[in-house]
């Protein structure tokens, strides 16, 4: 198969989805990997960063590297999550085990690097465990009107939210985290509903874990990538066809400009395209446009749960990937030495 950096998108099929040649890597006569060439081609371009989301371009690498980063982001970056629930009283309608599952999925704002891993036979300490307490009961609101129907007004504590989870510092945790107290990432996560006379009293222990063991430890809501679309106009598209061509793509992908008195279609932002192939359905555009995806240009999106910022997640994922490479290198060296 010939080397190609673009995936071809046709009306009824996709070509060159794989290749025998890894982009931007070669082997010389001594079979030595040219890492310098890969490093020179590698680029990261950041487009958007917010407290919960990050979009960046990863350019000049094979899909195996991009997918390794994605999988590490999802399942191998540690976080703190509620692992054990000691239920003292629960007279609500939600069973203990179901309520405990809901507790476990609440993202906790705590730096996992400040805590050690807890072994199964190890006692909880201030170095490996975070403790939350929940003590809430529902009762009638004496100030509510006689005909009030809204439970939020008629009752006090009719809904249990993540904000009701109160951090109980142990050891020197209060001093260690004085500048950034440990708490749930979001205060408005609904955990249960109560009615007068019902209460929930429990103690919750958070431990360090990774998403590979349980999804509650995953630091991302989603981590995904897609190949950069490449729209190539091979023949000029003008007049009414230009406007029809524009409507075949999402807003902002194609613009219609005036060139020497005629309206001409121009591709202005292909990264916004969803590659729906709508344009290939119209006969008037046959032979005038090619749809492709750049094989080594990945548009990466990271959506954090809020426990760790997206830039930190990317940095941690790269460190873990590098550590895995070092482990593999060491293992191979050990095998070669034994031979």
Image (cartoon, helix red, strand yellow):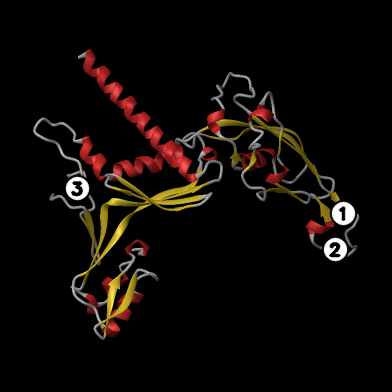
> Which residue lies most toward the top here?
338
Which label number is shown at residue 282? none
Local packing at callout 1 (Cα closer than 10 Å; few below 14, some 14-19, many 20+) is some
Q: Where residue 289 sits in the image (x, y, percent)?
A: 22, 70
Please identify the quarter of the rendering in which residue 293 is found. Answer: bottom left
Separation (CA) of disc 3 from disc 2: 68 Å
Separation (CA) of disc 3 from disc 1: 69 Å
Separation (CA) of disc 1 from disc 2: 10 Å
Residue matched to label 2: 148
- Which residue is at a point 71% across and 40% down the rendered structure image? 165
Q: How many marks?
A: 3
Whether residues under marks 1 and 2 lie with C-beta atoms below 8 angstroms apart, the answer is yes
> Which residue lies most toward the front here?
260
Which label number is shown at residue 141? 1
Front label number (3 vs 2): 3
Whether residues under marks 3 and 2 lie with C-beta atoms below 8 angstroms apart, the answer is no
Whether residues under marks 3 and 1 lie with C-beta atoms below 8 angstroms apart, the answer is no
- The reply, left or right, for residue 39 in relation to residue 71 is left
Residue 331 or 283: which is nearer the viewer?
Answer: 331
- The reply, left or right, for residue 195 in relation to residue 260 is right
Earlier-in-chain disc, 3 versus 2: 3
Residue matched to label 3: 19
Q: Where residue 255 sits in the image (x, y, percent)?
A: 33, 74
- The reply, left or right, for residue 319 in relation to residue 90 is left
């Amino acid at each position: 198969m010939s080397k190609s950096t673009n995936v071809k998108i046709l009306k009824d099929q996709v070509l060159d989805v794989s290749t025998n040649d890894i982009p931007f890597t070669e082997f010389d006569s001594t079979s030595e990997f040219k890492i310098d060439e890969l490093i020179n081609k590698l680029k990261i371009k950041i487009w958007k960063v917010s407290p919960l989301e990050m979009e960046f371009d990863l350019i000049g690498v094979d899909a195996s590297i991009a997918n390794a980063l994605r999988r590490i982001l999802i399942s191998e970056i540690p976080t703190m999550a509620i692992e054990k629930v000691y239920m003292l009283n629960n007279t609500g309608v939600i069973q203990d085990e179901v309520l405990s599952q809901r507790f476990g999925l609440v993202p906790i704002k705590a730096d996992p690097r400040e805590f050690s891993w807890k072994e199964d036979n190890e006692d909880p300490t201030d170095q490996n465990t975070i403790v939350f307490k929940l003590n809430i009961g529902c009762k009638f609101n004496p100030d509510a009107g006689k005909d009030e129907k809204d439970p939020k007004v008629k009752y006090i504590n009719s809904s249990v939210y993540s904000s009701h989870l109160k951090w109980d510092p142990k050891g020197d945790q209060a001093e260690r985290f004085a500048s950034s107290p440990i708490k749930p990432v979001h205060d408005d996560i609904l955990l249960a509903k109560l009615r007068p006379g019902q209460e929930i009293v429990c103690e919750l222990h958070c431990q360090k874990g990774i998403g590979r063991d349980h999804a509650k430890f995953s630091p991302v809501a989603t981590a995904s990538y897609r190949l950069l679309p490449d729209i190539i106009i091979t023949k000029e598209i003008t007049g009414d066809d230009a406007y029809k061509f524009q409507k075949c793509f999402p807003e902002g992908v194609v613009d219609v400009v005036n060139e020497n008195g005629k309206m001409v279609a121009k591709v202005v932002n292909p990264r916004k395209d969803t590659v729906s192939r709508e344009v290939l359905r119209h006969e008037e555009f046959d032979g005038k446009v090619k749809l492709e995806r750049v094989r080594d240009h990945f548009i990466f999106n990271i959506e954090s749960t809020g426990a760790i910022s997206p830039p930190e997640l990317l940095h941690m994922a790269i460190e873990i990937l590098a550590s895995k490479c070092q482990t593999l290198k060491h293992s191979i060296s050990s095998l070669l030495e034994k031979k």
